[in-house]
Image (cartoon, rainbow, N blue to C red):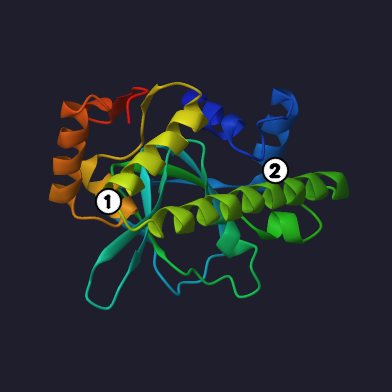
Amino acid sequence: MQKEQDREAIYRSIFFCDMDRKKADEIIDRLGGRTVTYDKGEIIIREREKLNNIGILLDGGLCKVQYYRDGTEQLVQKLVSSFVVGVEIAVSEKKTSPYDIYASEQAHIFWFPVRAMEEEGVLDLRERIEFYKKTVHFLANEDIRKCRKIELLSIRGIRERIERYLRVQQSRHKSSAFDIEFNREQMANYLGINRSVLSHELKKMEKEGILKVRKNHFELTDKE
């Protein structure tokens, strides 16, 4: 039996966010899923590993990363509560992961078999179509996010790259004051720059009155 807060996280996920709670409960019970606990630093999915399940992150945080030959880690995405985990892997033809995912803090994930979508029996036809629609929406959003990341990393100047990232966050939150999901090391990793360089540049920008920053909270001014 899941805790109420776990159900709330599932309700907020892309598969259930527009669904009536009673209907959602019925489907969740039919999916035959299980909740798994992961400790901080534990690998959840490894590169080239096959995945036949779809996860919903109930709490905690996950990092989706790729490693280069020299051991450098590139942060692809930070996942937070209610994010789906591995759906793009599980619905692919080979079901093989192109990256690693690990827990950045203790995390709980609700996993259910992808065959519930792919095969008859667990979900009726209308429900399966709805799940596939949600999956398409998720993949489209992921494609847009990746395009923005490529655009961001193509910016040569360090300050320009930082400013571009923060302006995107400002637009996303519809406010000049916002929290980001990254700590300073993760932010540097995501932007593809050295952590000390990032910290130094942020201090300069704050001194120049471009922004105010406290840990992962930022406030942008109109001064550039």
Q: Which residue carries the number 1 mark? A: 158
Q: Secondary structure at mark 1?
A: helix
Q: Nearer the viewer, residue 151 or 107?
A: 151
In the image, residue 70 above or below residue 201:
below
122 with respect to 204 (left or right): right
Quickly name the residue at label 2.
30
Q: Residue at x 22, y 76 (%)?
A: 70
The location of residue 130, given as percent across then percent down, is 79, 44
Please identify the quarter of the rendering in which residue 126 is found.
Answer: top right
Q: Quadrant of residue 127?
A: top right
Q: Residue at x 39, y 67 (%)?
A: 46
Residue 74 image point, x, y percent: 32, 61
Q: Residue at x 36, y 33 (%)?
A: 180
Q: Nearer the viewer, residue 182 or 82?
A: 182
Q: Position of residue 129 (x, y in %)?
A: 82, 49
Left or right of 137? Residue 99 is left
Q: Which mark is residue 27?
A: none
Cβ atoms at labels 1 and 2 below 8 Å apart = no
The amino acid sitting under disc 2 is Arg
